[in-house]
Each structure stands twice: as structure tokens, then as C-alpha cells.
Amino acid sequence: MTTQTLETVSEIWSEWRRQKLPLYLFLTLCFNLVIAPVVYAASGNEFSRTQAWSLGLLGLGTVVLSIYLFFVMFVPEKF
């Protein structure tokens, strides 16, 4: 590997350590790989795969928002 490649990898690594949002979004999309087929199977093929993906992401977003609001209500001094 060249020095430029190593510098690029170290820059990406340092950015990843500071910014967690892209990692969380990636993990959410990976988790949706598990959720979407379950939604698709439970719907009895009434939904398309795109709708199953969308419903999975909507459900995950709702759960995440609920957890966030729960912590904001009971631990407001951190926010």
C-alpha cells in the first residue's frame, strides 16, 4: 500500500471516531436487512419489498425516537 492510501485510511478512521452518526445509520440499515423480510413475510405478500423496507425503517425510527424521548424526559440535565 502506498503512503497516500495509508493516510486516507487513517483520516477515515479519525473521522469515524469523531462522528458516530454514519456508523449508526449503517448499522440501522444492516438491522433492517433482518426486519424487512419479517415484515414482508408477515404481510402475506400484500406489500412490495420496497414497502416492507420502508415499514421496517419507519418502525426502527419510531423505536429510536421513543427511546430518545424517554431519556430526554427522565434525564433532562444531560441534554
Image (cartoon, grey):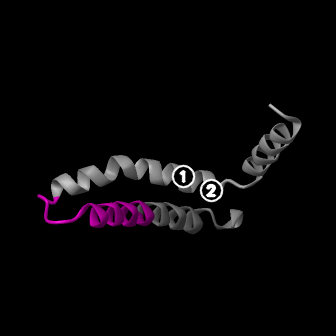
Name the residue rendered at 70%, 62% in the picture.
Answer: 78
Q: Quadrant of residue 56?
A: bottom left
Mark 2 burial class by Cα count in 10 Å: few <14, some 14-19, many 20+: few
Q: Position of residue 68 (x, y in %)?
A: 54, 63
Name the residue rendered at 48%, 53% in the picture.
Answer: 28
Q: Nearer the viewer, residue 38 or 3?
A: 3
Q: Quadrant of the C terminus?
A: bottom right
Is residue 68 located in the magenta-colored stretch of the structure? no
Q: Quadrant of the N terminus?
A: top right
Name the residue rendered at 56%, 63% in the picture.
Answer: 74
Q: Position of residue 66 (x, y in %)?
A: 45, 65
Q: Check the image and report above or below for 62 versus 38.
A: below
**Element class at badge 1:** helix
Q: Amino acid at mark 1?
A: Phe
Mark 1 burial class by Cα count in 10 Å: few <14, some 14-19, many 20+: few
Q: Position of residue 31 (x, y in %)?
A: 42, 48
Q: Mark 2 and mark 1 in contact? Answer it, CB < 8 Å.
A: yes
Q: Amino acid at mark 2?
A: Pro
Q: Check the image and report above or below for 12 versus 56.
A: above
Q: Which mark is residue 26?
A: 1
Residue reaching furthest top?
A: 1
Residue reaching furthest left?
A: 44
Q: Position of residue 18 (x, y in %)?
A: 77, 52
Q: Check the image and report above or below for 63 versus 3.
A: below
Name the residue rendered at 13%, 60% in the picture.
Answer: 45
**Element class at badge 2:** helix
Q: Nearer the viewer, residue 26 or 18?
A: 26
Q: Which mark is residue 22?
A: 2
Is residue 45 located in the magenta-colored stretch of the structure? yes
Q: Quadrant of residue 77?
A: bottom right
Per the rendered image, the range of residues in magenta is 43-62
